[in-house]
Amino acid sequence: MILLLHGFTGSGEDWWACCPSLKGHALAIDLPGHGADSAPARPFQDSIGDILGALPDSVDEVVGYSLGGRFALGLMALDPERFRRATIISAHPGLEDASQRADRLAADRAWIRRLRDDGIEAFVAAWESQPLFASQAGLPSAALARQRRRRLGQRPTGLAASLEQHGLGRMPSLWGALTAFPGDLTWIVGASDARFLGIAREVLRRRPATRLHVLPGVGHNPLLECPEILSDLLA
């Protein structure tokens, strides 16, 4: 069975909208602070342990997008023999430079303040205006409206706690565990997502056995931007 892990501001339901054919073969959970799950009060590695301990024995494959990709890497690091196959989509294995980590912590604190002081609507408007998501501008308005509704349905306290406990600045670097992973590893990234394309190429350099798929004309979120292509790849 496949474990499906969504991105920040998402939920397990994102996967069924993207890949309905996986129903019956996959488990899509809400990550801490998202959807129906409680706000995290403990660090990244503790939450990874909680998720791993709750998984059914039948789960032997993991797929994660963005934040979910980082959680997938955390699971692979904690128990590398558990998963025979992993697929990481548009994710960062962790910051190795102290100054970059400090910058990211400062940026996350600004997002946390916005969530706590301004509320979910102002946060979502600002979050969606980031250059990271510019490639979504040409998508059908109905798809963007569905995404916005799901984001507006999140709890500000949950998202703030997710950033506080599980943000990239808090997460340990998992590059070493990634390169040592003994299973089958696939990495998926959009060709228009320059920053994460660079990360994907570095993954391939450090772990040449990785299977890399670069999706033409796609940005950071393949679940939203090319669901049919992504569904075929995951199938």
Image (spheres, rainbow, N blue to C red):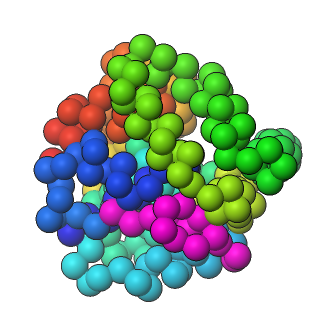
Residue at 64%, 70% in the rendered image: 39
Range shown magenta: 28-42
User: For this view, does 226 lie left or right of residue 74?
Assistant: left
Task: Give the side of residue 41 with respect to residue 23, left or right.
Answer: right
In the displayed structure, 234 sits above or below 31; it is above
Residue 64 visible, this orientation: yes
Q: Nearer the viewer, residue 209 or 134?
A: 134
- Front residue of this view, candidates 119 and 106: 119
Name the residue rendered at 57%, 54% in the picture.
154
The image position of residue 18, as x and y in percent, is 27, 42
Residue 229 higher or lower than 45, as above or below: above
Quadrant position of residue 81 = bottom left
Q: Is residue 217 above or below residue 213?
A: above
- Would residue 159 be found to the left or right of residue 188 on screen? right
* Image x and y of residue 10, in percent: 48, 50
Residue 141 is situated, as x and y percent measured from the top left of the image, at: 40, 21
Q: Residue at x 62, y 78 (%)?
A: 46
| Position of the N terminus by quadrant | bottom left
Main SS class of the magenta portion in the image: loop
Q: Is residue 22 or residue 97 the one in the foreground?
A: 22
- Residue positioned 56% across, 68% down in the render: 32
Tag count: 0
Percent of width and height locating residue 42: 69, 76
Residue 223 included in the magenta stretch of the image: no
